[in-house]
C-alpha cells in the first residue's frame, strides 16, 4: 500500500513542482488568521530543507510525510543497511515580529527506536541560523515522545515557542540521529506554527481555547489573508502583498464606488472580564482629497457581530475613525489613532471589522491600509525615542522607534533607500538595531530621511556588526538632492571584514560649502553582499547645523526657539509645524523627554514608558503674543486619554505666561473626557489680557499612578 501511495505522491510532486513559482531564500511572514505558517509534506518537503551535520542521510518526502531513516537501501542493490548520521529538517525563516505568542503543531510517527528515542529525535529553534546547522545556536523544545517508538501510529504534538523567540525571525528544525547499529524511521506531517498557547484544552484551565477562530491578539500585515471584499457598486478594493488599496479613479475616469473590505471573524472572548480594553490599530495613507469630499463619510471603519455576507442587512457599529489626508502629500504610511472596541462587542465569539470606501463621480481619493491589529491594552504607544543630545542632529539613531516594519525617520523619499530593512534584537545599546539586507548582485543602501544642513563640517558616526557568520562591509556617505532626485553620492572609506563577534565604530567626516539638502547613507557593497546590523547613529558638527527641521529632525533645539512677537490672527497645525514654540522641561525624572511632535497626532505629551507611569513635568510654550485692546479668542483642538478618573487640572492645563513670569490657568469652554482619543474643540476668551504680551503654555504633569497622554493638533488666536 505504501508503494502505491509513494507513486501517487511522486506524480503529485511532479505536478506541483512544475506549477510553483517559489522564491529563494524563503521568508515566511506573520499575516492574518491564527496560522502563521503551514507545511503538510503531502507531496514534497515544501519550503523545508534537509541539512546534514554528519553522514549522508537526508530527509525525503514519502507516505504523505517528511521521512528520515538511517536504515534503507542506500546503494539501490536491494540490500538495506544502517548508516550513522545527524540530519536536520530545517524550516524557512518564520517572522514572529508582530506575534504575542506562538506554538508549533505537527503529527509524527517513530518506529524501530531503541532506548535513546529522546536523544535521537529533537525539536529545535534558532534565531541566528545562517544556512549552517553546525554553527547555529539551537534551543531544544520539550517535545513529547509518549506513544512513539514502536509503530507508524501518528501522535499529535503541540509545543510552545519560548518567549525569548517571540518578536524575532526564527527557524525550526527536526533533528534526527542514526547509529551504525540501528536507526529509527521518523515520519512527520501537517507541520504548523500558530498564534496563541499550546495545549489549550479543558485540561489546561489556565489557557482556555476560544470557541472560534482568530483569537486576539490578531494581526494582518497586508489585509490580504482572510479578508474579503464586498462591493455595492463601482471599483472593488484590491488586495496586494504589502497593503490593501481602494480608489475609484482609473484611466482618467472616476467611477462612483461603495466597496467594503471585511476582516475574518475575530474572537474577543479572551478579553471578557479583563480590565484592559480591546483596541484596533492600523497604518494608512490617504491622498487626493478633492474639494467637497466628505472625508469622514467616505472612509469608515465599522464592526459587526451579525455579518453573514450581506453588508446591507448587517448591524454595523461606527468605530469613530476620522481619516486625515497625508500632510506631506506622499505615500508614507501613518499610524491611525487607536480605536477602542465598544464594550458590547467584547466577549463575542465573532466580530467582523469592515473598512468602507466611497467616492462620487466628481472625485476619488486613494486609500491604502496595512498592519491591521486587534489586541488588548491601551493605545499602542511607540517606544519613546530619547532625544539626541549635544549637537547630534539625527533622531531615532538608536533605532528604538518603529512604524510597522520600518525604523522611524530611516526611509528616504528618494532612491537613496534601497536596502530591505528589519528589526533586530541584537543591539549596540537599547533593545533594537536595524538589519540592512545585503545583495551579491547590487549595492544596497540604508538612508536617513531628507535633512537640510547649513554650510559646515560634519561627522557621521554609527556602529556596525555582521548580522550572520558571513563577514560584512559598509561604506558611509551622503547624497545631495537635486531637482527632486539624488545627485552624486559622496562616500568615505570602506570598512571591511566586520564580524558578528563585536560592534565596530564607523566614522565619516565631510564638508558642505553651502546650505544643502541631503540623505545620509550607509552603503552595503555587493561584495560580499552580507547582511549588516547598524545602531547608535550620530551626526555632529561644530560649525554647521540644521537649516530646517526642529523636533521632526531631532536636534537639540526641542522643537524650535522663540521667534519673537507673533501676529494675531495666528494659527498653527502641530502635525506639520512647531515653529516658534519651545519645550521647557521642569522635571523629567528618569525620562529623556515628555513632549514629541507626531505627524498624525500633533504635539503629544506622555510619561508612560517601559509599561509604567513615570513622574514628570514639562511645558510646551508658544512665542509671545500681544493681545489687541479688543481682546482675542483662543481655540484648541485636542485629545486626552488615560486620565483614569483623576482630576484633569492636576495633570494637564492651558496657561497664560505673563511678562512677569507668573502663570495663570486659562479656562477652556470644553475639555476631552480623558478616556479616549476623540479630538474636541475648546475655546477661551483672552480679553483679560488685552494690551498685554503673553505666551500660551500647555502644562503637563504626571505621577507614578497617572501618566495621561495629551495630544494637541491645532491652535489659533483670533
Image (cartoon, rainbow, N blue to C red):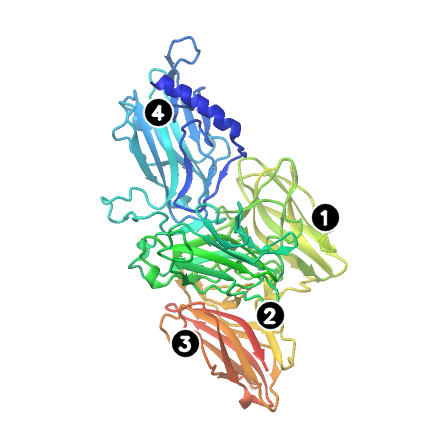
Asked if 73 appears above or below 532 in the picture, the reply is above
N-term mark: 1 or 3: 1
Circle 4 sits on which residue?
186
N-term mark: 4 or 2: 4
Query: Cβ–Cβ below 8 Å for labels 4 and 3?
Result: no
In-front residue for pair 90/246: 246
Q: Quadrant of residue 338?
A: bottom left
On the image, the x and y values in percent for residue 25 come to: 53, 34
Query: Cβ–Cβ below 8 Å for labels 1 and 3?
Result: no
Q: Secondary structure at mark 2?
A: loop
On the image, the x and y values in percent for residue 442 come to: 66, 38
N-term mark: 1 or 2: 1
Q: Is residue 617 visible?
A: no
Q: Quadrant of the N terminus?
A: top left
On the image, the x and y values in percent for residue 502 come to: 54, 42
- Indicate left or right for 593 with 111 as reference: right
At a point 69% along the width and 55% down the height, the residue shown is 518
Neighbourhood count class around disc 3 (C-alpha, 10 Å): few under 14, some 14–19, many 20 upward:
some
On the image, the x and y values in percent for residue 308 come to: 37, 52
Q: Quadrant of residue 328?
A: bottom right
Neighbourhood count class around disc 1 (C-alpha, 10 Å): few under 14, some 14–19, many 20 upward:
some
C-alpha span from label 3 to label 2: 25 Å
Circle 3 sits on which residue?
648
Amino acid at each position: 500500500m505504501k508503494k502505491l501511495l509513494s507513486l501517487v505522491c511522486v506524480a503529485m510532486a511532479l505536478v506541483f513542482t512544475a506549477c510553483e513559482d517559489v522564491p529563494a531564500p524563503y521568508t515566511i511572514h506573520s499575516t492574518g488568521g491564527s496560522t502563521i505558517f503551514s507545511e503538510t509534506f503531502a507531496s514534497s518537503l515544501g519550503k523545508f530543507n534537509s541539512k546534514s551535520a554528519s553522514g549522508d542521510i537526508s530527509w525525503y518526502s514519502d507516505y504523505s510525510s517528511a521521512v528520515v531513516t538511517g536504515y534503507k537501501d542506500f546503494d539501490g542493490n536491494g540490500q538495506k543497511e544502517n548508516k550513522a548520521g545527524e540530519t536536520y529538517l530545517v524550516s524557512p525563516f518564520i517572522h514572529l515580529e508582530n506575534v504575542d505568542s506562538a506554538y508549533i503543531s505537527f503529527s509524527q510517527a517513530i518506529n524501530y527506536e531503541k532506548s535513546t528515542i529522546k536523544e535521537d529525535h529533537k525539536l529545535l529553534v534558532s534565531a541566528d541560523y545562517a544556512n549552517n546547522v553546525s554553527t547555529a545556536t539551537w534551543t531544544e523544545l520539550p517535545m513529547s515522545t509518549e506513544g512513539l517508538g514502536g509503530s507508524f501510529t501518528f501522535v499529535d504534538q503541540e509545543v510552545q515557542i519560548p518567549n525569548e523567540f517571540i518578536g524575532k525571525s526564527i527557524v525550526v528544525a527536526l533533528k534526527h540521529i542514526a547509529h551504525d547499529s540501528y536507526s529509527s524511521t521518523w515520519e512527520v506531517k501537517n507541520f504548523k506554527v500558530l498564534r496563541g498557547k499550546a495545549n489549550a484544552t479543558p485540561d489546561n484551565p489556565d489557557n482556555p481555547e476560544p470557541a472560534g477562530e482568530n483569537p486576539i491578539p490578531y494581526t494582518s500585515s497586508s489585509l490580504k489573508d482572510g479578508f474579503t471584499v464586498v462591493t455595492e457598486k463601482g471599483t472593488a478594493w484590491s488586495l496586494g502583498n504589502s497593503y490593501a488599496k481602494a480608489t475609484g479613479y482609473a484611466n482618467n475616469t472616476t467611477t462612483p464606488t461603495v466597496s467594503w473590505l471585511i476582516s475574518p471573524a475575530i474572537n474577543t472572548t479572551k478579553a471578557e472580564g479583563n480590565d484592559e480594553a480591546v483596541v484596533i490599530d492600523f497604518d494608512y495613507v490617504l491622498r487626493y482629497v478633492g474639494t467637497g469630499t466628505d472625508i469622514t463619510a467616505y472612509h469608515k471603519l465599522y464592526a459587526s457581530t451579525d455579518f453573514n455576507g450581506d453588508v446591507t442587512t448587517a448591524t454595523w457599529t461606527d468605530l469613530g475613525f476620522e481619516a486625515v489626508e497625508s500632510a506631506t502629500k506622499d505615500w508614507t504610511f501613518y499610524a491611525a489613532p487607536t480605536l477602542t472596541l465598544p464594550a458590547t462587542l467584547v466577549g463575542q465569539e465573532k466580530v467582523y471589522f469592515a473598512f468602507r470606501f466611497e467616492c462620487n463621480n466628481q472625485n476619488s481619493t486613494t486609500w491604502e491600509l496595512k498592519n491591521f491589529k486587534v489586541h488588548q491594552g491601551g493605545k499602542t504607544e511607540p517606544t519613546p525615542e530619547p532625544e539626541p543630545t549635544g549637537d547630534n542632529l539625527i533622531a531615532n539613531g538608536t533605532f528604538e522607534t518603529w512604524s510597522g516594519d520600518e525604523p522611524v525617520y530611516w526611509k528616504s523619499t528618494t532612491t537613496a533607500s534601497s536596502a530591505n530593512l528589519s528589526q533586530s534584537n541584537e543591539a549596540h545599546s537599547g533593545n533594537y538595531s536595524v538589519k540592512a539586507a545585503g545583495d551579491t548582485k547590487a549595492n544596497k543602501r540604508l538612508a536617513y530621511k531628507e535633512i537640510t544642513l547649513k554650510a559646515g563640517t560634519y561627522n557621521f558616526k554609527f556602529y556596525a556588526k555582521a548580522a550572520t557568520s558571513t563577514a560584512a562591509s559598509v561604506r558611509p556617505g551622503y547624497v545631495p538632492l537635486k531637482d527632486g532626485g539624488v545627485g552624486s553620492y559622496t562616500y568615505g572609506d570602506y570598512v571591511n571584514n566586520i564580524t558578528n563577534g563585536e560592534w565596530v565604530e564607523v566614522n565619516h567626516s565631510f564638508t558642505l560649502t553651502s546650505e544643502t539638502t541631503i540623505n545620509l547613507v550607509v552603503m552595503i557593497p555587493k561584495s560580499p553582499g552580507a547582511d549588516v546590523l547598524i545602531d547608535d547613529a550620530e551626526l555632529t558638527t561644530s560649525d554647521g547645523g540644521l537649516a530646517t527641521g526642529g523636533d521632526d529632525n531631532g536636534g537639540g533645539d526641542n522643537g524650535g526657539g522663540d521667534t519673537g512677537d507673533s501676529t494675531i490672527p495666528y494659527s498653527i497645525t502641530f502635525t506639520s509645524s512647531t515653529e516658534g514654540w519651545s519645550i521647557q522641561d521642569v522635571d523629567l525624572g528618569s525620562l529623556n523627554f515628555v513632549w514629541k511632535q507626531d505627524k498624525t497626532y500633533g504635539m503629544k505629551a506622555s510619561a508612560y514608558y517601559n509599561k509604567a507611569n513615570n513622574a514628570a513635568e514639562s511645558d510646551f510654550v508658544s512665542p509671545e503674543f500681544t493681545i489687541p485692546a479688543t481682546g482675542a479668542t483662543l481655540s484648541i483642538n485636542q485629545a486626552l486619554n488615560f486620565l483614569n478618573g483623576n482630576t484633569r487640572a492636576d495633570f494637564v492645563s492651558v496657561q497664560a505666561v505673563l511678562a512677569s513670569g507668573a502663570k495663570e490657568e486659562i479656562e477652556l469652554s470644553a475639555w476631552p473626557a480623558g478616556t479616549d482619543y476623540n479630538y474636541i474643540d475648546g475655546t477661551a476668551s483672552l480679553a483679560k489680557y488685552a494690551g498685554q504680551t503673553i505666551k500660551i503654555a500647555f502644562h503637563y504633569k504626571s505621577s507614578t499612578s497617572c501618566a495621561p497622554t495629551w495630544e494637541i493638533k491645532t491652535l489659533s488666536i483670533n
